[in-house]
Image: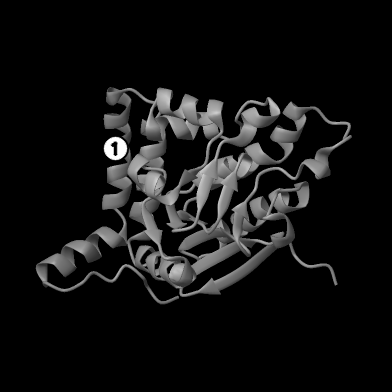
Amino acid sequence: MEQSVILVSDQAAVRTLTLNREHKLNAANDKLLLTLTRELERADADPAVRVVVITGAGRGFCAGQDLGDVSGRDMTFTEHLNHTYNPLIRTIRGLSKPVITAVNGVAAGAGASLALAGDIRLWTRGANLIEVFSNIALVPDSGSTWFLPRLVGYHRAFEMMALAEKIGSDDALRLGLCEQVFPDESFRADVQAYAERLAARPANALKLTKQALTDALTSTLDQALDREAELQQLAGDHWEHEEGVTAFKEKRPAQFVREG
């Protein structure tokens, strides 16, 4: 039986999607990219899932495009991106639930873009990121030109893309490419514990917060203020808000997860 390119596991309202081409450091082919997009859509539609984790099998997160998979193919670069990577990145950013990219090893090329696309980026100590495109005289794609300068500024982003040098976990944390770095030996458990903390937070409020932040990245201040007011009404009308206020008054932890 052919092994799945994406492994799916559920634990405590957290769905983990594991890139499973370990023999190639999880380098992406069409099947992996399309399957990952489909599994993200399934997770978004599943009310039992509150947080999604994307990680890699073995010692790599994602080594970028599997060049052997596209060699000699009768498809332009533009067609390939619009068929595979671009829908995947749009799905991650549009998901109504928090997405954690758990970077367990090398994240190169489009794999770097995937690593940066998460709402939360958790790294293992031994992970590294490299914008490798210039080594084969290509332009960074799959969202890197949008994500990276917003994180590190134009000049640092250009340097990283032009020189294609590895960024280790210490520098990644300092530059804001990740939010937490965990020891290699406890990484899976640490990621799961972090994801469960996130899953216990108010899901509707986090969905609306994600929308507000994403919209604000391409809006004026006036537009952001108007959008905040609109989304705040949606949050305030939801039962989570009443529970949060009641819990505050009763001096107890709020319970934002309802059975069933």
The residue shown at (54%, 29%) is 163
The percent position of residue 194, horizontal first and vertical second, equals 38, 65
- Image quarter of residue 58: bottom right
Which element carries disc 1, helix, strand or loop?
helix
Q: Is residue 27 left or right of residue 115?
A: right
The image shows residue 80, relative to residue 50, as above or below, that is above
Q: Can residue 1 be seen by looking at this rendering?
A: yes
Q: Nearer the viewer, residue 7 or 26?
A: 26
| Residue drawn at the location 32% of the way across and 26% of the way down | 223
Between 209 and 55, the residue placed more toward the observer is 55
The C terminus: image quadrant: bottom left
- Mark 1 closeness class: few <14, some 14–19, many ≥20 residues within 10 Å: some
- In the figure, 42 relative to 33: above or below? below
Q: Nearer the viewer, residue 231 or 72?
A: 72
Q: Give the percent coordinates (x, y) of residue 258.
A: 37, 73
Q: Quadrant of the N terminus?
A: bottom right
Up/down of 111 relative to 200, above or below: above
Residue 173 located left or right of residue 44: left
**Up-down: is 25 above or below 175?**
below
Which residue is rendered at x = 73% and y = 60% of the image? 23
- Amino acid under label 1? Glu
In the picture of the structure, the residue carrying the numbered disc 1 is 228
Question: x, y (%) of residue 127?
Answer: 50, 54
Residue 46 x %, y %:
55, 64
